[in-house]
Image (cartoon, rainbow, N blue to C red):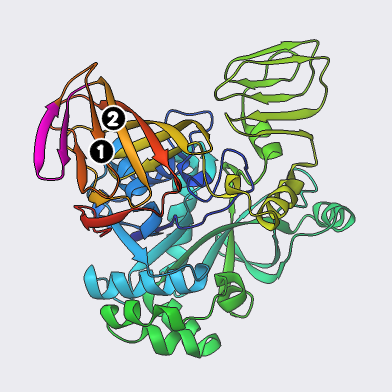
């Protein structure tokens, strides 16, 4: 069996924590590990790390590598999508990768999982996976259905039909309903939340693609290298629309474990521990006379007085306040920010790079200040800027600075100057993190004023 984890999504339903540069699969929410790391660890009792394939994109490669290192699974395979094309092309690409690069046969079962769900307890989940894998091995396309506990309008639904071994034949898939329809589904008793997880043999998926998505099948029938080269020609379509809603071979297996797709701040409130007043508190927060409220702080103190049934989420550049039950409308906020061209949609003040991170401390006309952290043994690209000069002040660790033709070591409380239009590179040759304050001066200070000449991360 091979595990395919889909980790390429750039969703913003958990804005302001989740943004294009750091979507929710890489967030740590109520746990020391990110949602992606939790997902990987969830499957390790079933398979070896070398049996795990993580599908993502180039922008998130360094995030995925960092999360794999954090959970001791560097041996897992990372498959980069050439561009975002929804789940059906991503799964088709992964199937071809498994067949051509990992030696999978048409009869081997592949299990597909999103990277950003919470499922507990793990041992119950594993039992359900084994049941699904057994059915998939019989040539069925198996999905997990979650028994609804409330009339949720944020999930798609699966209508279960007649029993079939450990599961049910799927009668239909239903889109996210309105409240009245969700209540009817809950009362009917044979509707399940669609978990987005699938199990199938490689041969089964290819057969169903040939039957229902001949365009994708034609492309994915070629060798893996050709599939990647022609990936842009794939239609952008979900696996539900492409195959699951059409196939006569789809079964659903009820998932007995607790499941949450963490698709909204209401969902976050549901999974976090509560105090005696029903408040979920994370970060530096003081609730006074508050009830049934989520308060999540990242960089500043939050003091709440008399709050009831509210969601308060703070980052160092955005604060979101919403009524509980209304957090699905966060997507409307993101839509408005996109319309206005606001950078908050895509960027945090702290941005992560393959070599470390930088945090914008302050900016104004003609200047920008950053704190830059370079991990041990890492280096920035050899580059220049046409429109700005830079001052580097080392506040921790030791820097190796290349400026023009000169190389020098820069220690704590020492500084160097990088003139405009001069080639330069910053390296950390030491064993502890290098921390510097960078002061930029110039007429244009955006990140696209970088001309790279050499880069160990393949970005030049």
> Where's the C terminus, which quadrant?
bottom left
Magenta stretch, main secondary structure class: strand
Q: Which residues are magenta?
A: 397-409
The residue drawn where x is 80% and y is 42% is: 326
Q: Is residue 96 left or right of residue 258?
A: left
Mark 1, residue position = 418
The verdict on residue 407 being magenta is: yes
The residue drawn where x is 90% and y is 55% is: 180
The verdict on residue 322 being magenta is: no
Instruction: Tell me, yes or no, whether the two marked residues, 2 and 1, touch with CB atoms within 8 Å.
Output: yes
The residue drawn where x is 31% and y is 41% is: 66
Q: What is the quadrant of residue 283 in the picture? A: top right
> Where's the N terminus, which quadrant?
bottom left
Q: Is residue 45 left or right of residue 158?
A: left
Mark 2, residue position = 392
The residue drawn where x is 80% and y is 48% is: 151
Q: Position of residue 28 (x, y in %)?
A: 48, 34
Say what secondary structure mark 1 lies in: strand
Q: Position of residue 194 (x, y in %)?
A: 64, 58
Q: What is the quadrant of residue 236 in the picture? A: bottom right
| Residue 193 visible in the picture | yes
Q: Is residue 265 left or right of residue 374?
A: right
Q: Residue furthest right?
A: 180
Q: Is residue 459 shown above or below 75? A: below
């Amino acid at each position: 069996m091979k595990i395919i984890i889909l980790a390429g999504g750039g969703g913003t339903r958990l804005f302001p924590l989740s943004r294009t540069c750091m979507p929710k699969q890489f967030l740590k929410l109520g746990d020391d590990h990110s949602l992606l790391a939790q997902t990987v660890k969830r499957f390790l009792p079933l398979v070896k790390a070398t049996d795990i394939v993580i599908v993502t994109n180039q922008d998130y490669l360094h995030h995925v590598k960092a999360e794999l290192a954090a959970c001791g699974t560097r041996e897992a395979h990372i498959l980069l999508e050439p561009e975002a094309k929804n789940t059906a092309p991503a799964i088709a690409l992964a199937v071809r990768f498994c067949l051509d690069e990992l030696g999978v046969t048409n009869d081997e079962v592949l299990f597909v999982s999103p990277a950003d769900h919470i499922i507990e307890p793990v041992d119950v989940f594993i039992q359900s996976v084994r049941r699904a894998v057994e059915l998939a091995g019989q040539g069925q396309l198996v999905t997990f259905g979650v028994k609804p506990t409330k009339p949720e309008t944020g999930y798609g639904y699966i209508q279960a039909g007649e029993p079939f071994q450990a599961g049910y034949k799927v009668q239909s898939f239903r889109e996210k309903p309105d409240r009245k329809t969700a209540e009817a589904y809950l009362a009917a008793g044979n509707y399940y939340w669609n978990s987005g997880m699938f199990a199938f043999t490689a041969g089964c998926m290819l057969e169903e693609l040939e039957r229902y998505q001949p365009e994708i099948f034609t492309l994915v029938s070629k060798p893996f290298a050709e599939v990647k080269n022609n990936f842009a020609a794939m239609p952008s379509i979900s696996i539900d629309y492409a195959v699951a809603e059409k196939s006569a071979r789809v079964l659903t297996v009820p998932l007995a474990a607790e499941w949450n797709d963490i698709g909204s701040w209401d969902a976050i409130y549901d999974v976090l521990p509560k105090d005696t007043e029903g408040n979920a508190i994370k970060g530096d927060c003081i609730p006074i006379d508050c009830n049934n409220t989520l308060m999540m702080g990242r960089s500043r103190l939050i003091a709440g007085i008399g709050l009831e049934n509210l969601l308060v989420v703070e980052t160092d550049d955005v604060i979101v306040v919403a009524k509980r039950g209304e957090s699905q409308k966060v997507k409307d906020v993101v839509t408005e920010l996109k319309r206005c061209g606001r950078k908050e949609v895509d960027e945090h003040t702290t941005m992560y790079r393959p070599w470390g991170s930088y945090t914008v401390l302050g900016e104004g006309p003609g200047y920008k200040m950053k704190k830059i952290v370079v991990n041990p043994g890492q280096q920035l690209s050899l580059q220049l800027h046409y429109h700005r000069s830079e001052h580097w002040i080392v506040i921790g660790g030791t820097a190796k600075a290349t400026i023009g033709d000169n190389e020098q070591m820069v220690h704590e409380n020492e500084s160097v100057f990088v003139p405009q239009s001069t080639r330069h590179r910053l390296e950390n040759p030491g064993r502890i993190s290098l921390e510097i304050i960078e002061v930029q001066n110039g007429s244009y200070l955006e990140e696209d004023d970088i001309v790279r000449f050499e880069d160990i991360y393949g970005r030049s």
